[in-house]
Amino acid sequence: MNCEKAQKWISLEMDGELSPRRAAWLHAHLDACSSCQRSRDKWESIGVQMRKRLVPVMQTPEAEWADVRRAIRNDQEEREEAEEAWVLSAPLRWATATLLIMILGYGLFGAFRKSPAGIARAGATQVEFVETGLPDSTPMVYTDAESGWTVIWVVEANGKEGGNAGT
Amino acid sequence: MLAHKISRAFKVGLLAIACLLAVAAAARAEPVTIQATLILASNDPAPLDSRLDRVEYKLRRIFGFEYYRHYGEGSALLNLPGESTVELGHGFRLAISASGSKDDRIRTSVQWFRGDEMVLNTTVGMKRSVPVILGGISHEGGTLIVTLVAE
């Protein structure tokens, strides 16, 4: 809240036309702003002096209409402030929702990635795909636990791959 | 006041996106060298080769062959993404393409050719300095092994 608005609301509060919510905002501002606090004290002292004079107040039709218009304007301003609050909070809500979706998505994606769908996931190397162009041969993938090396081996059908492999 | 808050949030968002793009660009720019060594494994006696000192004892434990001959080697310096061909000698070559880095692994596709014949085709996520072994191809009474190391 700025001081200009505070000055206006001080006047409304003294007239008894400030809503409780606005009054709370105003008091919070007054607690932090000595200038507005002094202004409020000044207006209060003027009000006290005026009440001491006991001048009867005549309510003219023009004054009544002015009261109605002021009430309408105050109500409209309050609605606009509520809309401002929604506009401010909407991006935050969307950002929070997006963040949650990203966290959940990352978690689920990570879980799927760790599933045994891949050919070999152990060790430092990840094997995504392997094939051999040799007829009647089969590729084999394993990871040596001791060295952490991943071996991609072509096992030929006729056993020519060297019988010692893997022993 | 509302406009000011939205403008500030917009600026913070732009800054965050710029930081992410900068990090991604730095990760993409780092090149990788793929070192390939062609080895002929067999049980026929062969002299010790100092070029295999770092791998021979491990190969012997894993595969069980008695002797390992250095048969050829080559390397390729790749920007990510990038591709290259490594001639290993004796009619063997590797077609290598590295498409990027993720989780500290370099996604690398390797096609091993004997002449025009593709003997092995694989895609692996390689960690730097951790060898990947390809092998099993019969050749001249032994079995061929290729060690691949990304540095």
Image (tube, coloured by chain):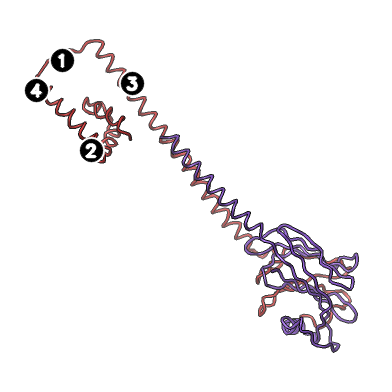
Chain colours: A red, B purple
Q: Mark 2 points at which residue?
A: A34
Q: Is mark 4 on a helix, strand or loop?
A: helix
Q: Contact, CB < 8 Å: mark 1 with mark 2? A: no
Q: Which amino acid type is shown beneath numbered disc 2?
A: Ser
Crowding around mark 4 (Cα neighbors within 10 Å: few <14, some 14 to 19, many 20+) is: few
Which element type, helix, strand or loop, lies under badge 3?
helix
In primary-sequence order, the first of circles 1 and 3 is: 1
Q: Which of marks 3 and 4 is in front?
A: 4
Callouts 2 and 4 in the same chain: yes
Give a yes or no on whether discs 2 and 3 share a subunit: yes
Camera-side residue of A68 and B100: B100
In the image, residue B98 sits, relative to residue B41, either above or below, namely: above
| Residue at disc 1, secondary structure | loop
The alpha-carbon separation of the residues under discs 1 and 3 comes to 23 Å
Q: How far apart are marks 3 and 4 (CA)?
A: 31 Å
Disc 1 with disc 2 on a shared chain: yes
Tell which of B80 and B141 is nearer to you.
B80
Mark nearer the viewer, 1 or 4: 4
Label 3 neighbour load within 10 Å: few <14, some 14-19, many 20+? few
User: Around disc 2, counting alpha carbons within 10 Å, would you say few (fewer than 14), some (14 to 19), or many (20 or more)?
Assistant: few
Q: Quadrant of residue A49?
A: top left
Q: Mark 1 points at which residue?
A: A57
What residue is pinned by disc 4?
Answer: A52
**Amino acid type, residue under disc 4 in the picture:** Lys
Mark pair 1, 2: CA separation: 33 Å
Q: Name the residue under label 3.
A: A72
